[in-house]
Image: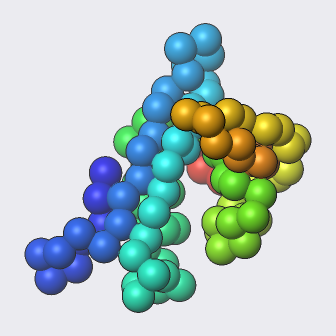
Amino acid sequence: MVAESAGEIKGFANFFPSKQNIEEAELAAIYILPEVQSQGLGGKLLSKGIQELGGLKTLFGVVEKENRIGRRFYESKGFKYVNEFVEKLQGHVFKSIKWYLRLHDGIRI
């Protein structure tokens, strides 16, 4: 899904339902252009994704450990820390943090 303003894309978010548990999903990516960050677009994308998936109990997300802006976003939206882990992708090593958000019938609790 995308966030638009004046006909221009300002950000996007990708959500994927879990294959193992219909009450779980992953926020695989969320990105807002730097010049429009802190204007509520990320929160709107998050809420829309939760609403569209419907019936979720848990939403997971992963952010690179060094991404302070991303970490602040997850924290500000009520996500809780799960763990840290290392990923290797095409020869690059990424230190990441996994977060979760508890929901009740698709509403943040």
Q: Which residue is the extreme one toward the front?
A: 91
Counting from the top left corner in percent of width and height, residue 35 is at 41, 88
Residue 69 image-quadrant placement: bottom right
Find the residue positioned furthest to the left: 7
* Residue 43 picture location, percent across and down: 51, 68
Where 84 sits versus 79, above or below? Answer: above
Is 11 or 53 nearer to us in this picture? 11
Residue at image position (55%, 22%) is 18
Asked if residue 21 is positioned above or below residue 101 in the image, the reply reads above
Q: Along the horizontal axis of the image, is 75 left or right of 21?
A: right
Q: From the viewer's perspective, is 98 left or right of 16?
A: right
Of residues 101 and 97, the one nearer the viewer is 97
Instruction: Please identify the residue farthest to the top as the structure is shown.
Output: 20
Q: Where's residue 40, x and y in %?
A: 48, 78
81 on left or right of 20: right
Q: Which residue is drawn at 61% across and 28% down?
A: 24
- The spot of residue 77 in percent (x, y) is 67, 64
Q: Is residue 100 visible?
A: no
